Image (cartoon, rainbow, N blue to C red):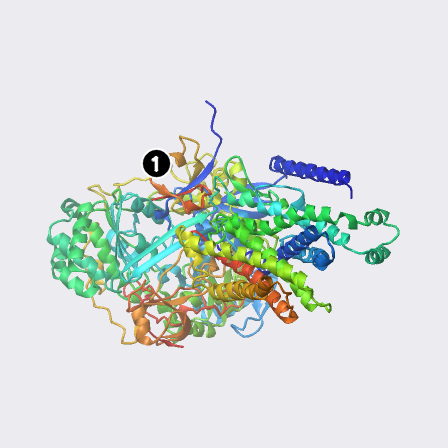
Amino acid sequence: MKSIEWGYLIINYLFLGGLSAGLFFVSAVATFLHNGDGRHQRIARWGALLAPWPVALGSLLLIFDLGNWYRFYKLFLHFRWISPMSIGSWLLMLFTLLALAYAYSWLNDGERASLLAHVPQRLTALRTCLRDLSGHRRTLAALGLPLAVGVGIYTGVLLGAVQSRPFWNTNLVAQLFLFSALSTGCAGLMFAFAFSRQPMAAAELRMLYLLDICFLTLEFFVVLPYLVHSQLSVEAVRQSMHLILGGPFTFVFWVFFLWFGLLLPLGIEVGEVMPALLSKSGLHARKWLVGATAVLILSGGFLLRYVFVFAGQMSAFK
Amino acid sequence: MAKKPRRFAIVIDSKKCINCKACNVACRAQNNVPLAHSRNWMNEETRGTFPKLLAAFEPEQCHHCEHPACVRVCPTGASYQRPDGIVAINDSDCVGCRYCVIACPYDARFFREDRGVVEKCDLCARRIDRGEVPACVETCPGKVRTFGDSNDANGQVAQLLATRQYRVKKAEAGTGPQLYYLL
Amino acid sequence: MNRRRFLTFAAGGAASATLASTVSCLQPFLKKPATVSTRQDIPTTCEMCVNKCSIIAVVENGKIQKLNPNPESPRSRGMVCARGNAGLQQVYDPSRLKKPLIRAGARGEGKWKTASWDEAWNFAGEKLTKVKEKYGPQASVWSSTESFAETFFKSLGLAFGSPNVERHPTLCLASVNLAYSLTFGTMPSFDLANARYVIMSGANRLESFIMPDTVDLIGSTTERKTRLVYLDPRFTVTASKADEWFPIKPGTDLAFVLAMLNVIIGENRHDKEFVAGYTAGFDKLAEHVKAFTPEWAETETEIHAKDITRIAREFADAAPRAVYYAGRRSSWYREDFQFRRAQAILNAVVGNWDRQGGMAPNAKIALGEFLFLPWDDPQAARVDDMDKNFPLAAKGDGAYLKMRENILAGIPYPVKAWMVHKQDPMNALPEQAKTIRMIEQMDFVGVIDVQMSDTAWYADVVFPESTYLERQDPVEMLPGIVPVVVYRQPAIPPLHDTKPTLEIVQGLAKRLGLSQYFDYTIDQWIDAQVKVLPLDTPLEYLKHHGVWAPPDGAKFGATLTQDHRFVTKSGKIELYSERLQEAGYDPMPVYHTPMQPPAGSFRLILGRRAYFTQANTTNNPWLNTFAPENVLWIHPASAAQVGIEDGQLVDVSSSVGALHLKARVTQEIRPDCVFTMHGYGKRSKWQRLVAGNGASDAEIIETAWDKVSGGGAFHETFVKVRKA
């Protein structure tokens, strides 16, 4: 009996996991490119400090989605490489731990001291761990980068590896989710900057925009073959595509995800960045536009997963 | 010559099925399945205009595939396949992620909200281990299902598969189903 | 964090992951500790319908886990149907009767007070005695449906002094039994496993009932050995499997049979040797059927003449392995008896009597009889006056609807007490309003049942019987082509304060001063029954096997000898019946065109589904799930005609009542008929799944009965269908 097993808890987790992966990724890139110096310092630091929390929340959602949530530890008693969910659970755990360590490494001395002050004296083991890690930022970024990419990709593999759901069963889904995740990471930072009281530096906006343009473009060029190739595939796949070609998810997919969530923000970013690149003048950051563009991208990221999780479960071989 | 390992399969002669629901109730009784779900189900086809009408009935349950997708995707190994081909679930290891429910091409699995685990037809493994046949096979007035070891050349299943035309469902999903429908 | 520490962590993590995965691989092979189970396999007999299949109750730790088929019974063909499997639910039904109940409010109000058995017996005994004193013992009716223990209940009524024993055949198969009995001297069985050509009018063997005939038919038709021609106004499961299905106009089956006789006799295709040797009245029959041509039958039945002719020829050619199946529930039309009689005659002239693949008289196994103290026969005549109204019918079964009519009119004498056993007349009888009036004019109504039926709901006292899985019943012999003796023993002791029928009867008998007639135990009764069986230790055998069949299997031809005398007036198979003629009925079937429903109205026809035993099991949750409510089947053209759509609530009314049902607009029924399932819209609030859910057809079916047998005729009602 076909049933919809995975709903909003899973959709939110996929979005949040991707968001964390993207935040970490952008922060890591910023750290490598400029060794965390002035120019992209804020991107690196904010990205690092924000990264662990969406995935931590998402993981909680995942745990509570389980039939018996208190059995979640069993996921870590086994490692089955043929199960995307097994790999994913381990990846998630390792990534979250590492993202926490990375975030901690970006705390300045004052913040570290006040954190230490909240740790009871008795927990000496914990206090020893809470040393100054700020010197290891690059190392942590390097270690975390493959994990972040892993988290971003595996959410797509989770769906793509299911041979019985024609809507999902393509390797493009992994790419799609990865680029979408990285893009939401950029958007997350754009959103944070837009709402901070500090002014936005042209340089950091330029970096975010350029990165995001890459990610969105790549994402678009995965969506395109996904749509085209599906029409050239077996009947079960063609039939499943009907869900977004006339079926219940058509409007959400084309209008809210593809247009408002991908192409429009891409156009805005290109429109903003192009003149600056061509004339070599600085970007004028209008906070409201940056914020609005970020919201569009974040919504798009969420809706992509919304469409895929539901439509996939509704598709089948006849 | 070494004896081949047992591999259980069911051959179904849908022509004989009259949709009497005996197999559905027998399974429910045997396996304490709550009313909200069923481990086996009926595919009904009705079409035509009076008086040229058709009604056909085709029972279905877990296909106990050769390459079960549900076993592959299970993160804890709670879903496993016995050496005799029966795909079973180890309740105590199931965390209730329902990945297997989604992975099954036949929608044979369901989630038990009351117990937080996934459940499906296990060919009445307890009965088989006692030398009996699954409840659905035994109870049927029309003897629609033939159950047995497909590796036993002298057995009924092998005989039927060797001498009759048959089809399996959703072969293109690639899981190697072991529920054979006689044509 | 330095490099060394990182590497340690990494290596440690990888090692633990590998170990964990190795451990998980081993898990399926770890043996679970063996649990000691107290499993018992107890052979017994099912009571979910009248087929009485042999089952084995699997009892674990004192709870019935499953009911499995008993492969030793040739009768049940190694199967257990849906309702057989659902029998567990009857035992563990939380709303079943658990203690005796005495009415505390008005009849039908549903207010009860629980009573002890003594209180209940005393109450009933008092009321019955009062009625006996004021009106005489004949002022009571004792109605029951067949069961292994029915004999005790009937005996109580007779010992009480009442001739008014009413049994279920008068609502079910009275007409078909009588028709075949008057033709052959007995009602035979049909060898569907070996028949090569089967014609069925209704009977819907593949859907309405799961019995050996069902199993045999599935096997023989799907293996292409048997050709099935099926006549039914509805496209049923049997229709879907039949080689040919004709949506015959309802009420015209007799025309079809007469035309077949016309062709077969006219073309000399009948079995001349058989007819000459074993039948009487052929010449009269040949003359009689000359008028019933296929062309004439086409105008009546709406089946093409050429098809009728062809089928008649094919039927005769396939004989003696050709049967016109008699059917079971024959409560169809006022003329039903003559239709079944025509079938019997047709079967006779093609010579399929007592032959493999044809019909066979039922073989029996002799059972001993317990010699109980006999009582004086009741003095008064029956209230339904069978002798006068239905002189040829089975007197011991009565004529239920005539009885009700007389009771309501108070003729020939008042009837003021009603005891009911294992029956639900509120739903079994048509025109429910009259049943309620009959109840209302009673001084006393007592019901013995396992669940709170609608009739129990209106009773003054309800006696809870133990379910069939909880009691020891008398041994029963099932006649048939292969007869069997079946045994019923408890799988578990009674869960609640319930008793088996014999003990309930004994308690009543004591209060009525009739103890001496019931002064025995069930074990004594059974001992006397099994003593005569050709087994060394019959009781032990039955306890362990649950069923016994004579080893020689099916035998045919015993009656086909020169000197065999059929139990008929002439001693032969009567194609022409003098007894019918003398009693004032047509000695050979005469056809009357049935009335047609006026515009905007439709004929209401009934039918069964094998998971519902009449109105009995619709509340069983494992069965109710297949059809939680009943709906009205109506053809799309008819629906358009009266302006209703699929799923819409419609008003269905007849001259005696009205009800609301959802419409099911379907191609699967003739445009001039509508259909609905039986057993819904209950008044008994204890039957929560069907109380107020759907509607009871008993409310709108008009009272009508078959002229010769007095059996109910339930397809004579025209209903108006409108938007609700």
Using the image as rendered, state which of residue A210 and residue C84 is in the foreground.
Answer: A210
Between C712 and A251, the one nearer to me in the picture: A251
Residue C670 as seen in the image, left or right of residue A45: left
Q: Amino acid at mark 1?
A: Asp
**Is residue C109 placed above or below C576 in the rendered structure?**
below
Report whether B165 appears left or right of C561. Answer: right
Give the farthest residue toward the right.
Answer: A121
Q: Chain of mark 1?
A: C
Residue visible at 22% across and 65% down? C584
Residue C531 image-quadrant placement: top left
Task: Give the left or right position of residue C628, taking residue A299 as reference.
Answer: left
Image quadrant assignment for residue C294: bottom left
Mark 1 falls on what kind of element?
Answer: loop
- Asked if residue C33 can be seen in this view, the reply is no
Residue C68 seen: yes
C701 relative to C219, above or below:
below
Q: Identify the residue under disc 1.
A: C552
Q: Where's residue B7, x and y in %?
A: 47, 35
Report x, y in % for residue C646: 38, 69
Quadrant assignment for the C terminus of chain B: top left
Looking at the rendering, in which quadrant would you find the N terminus of chain B?
top left
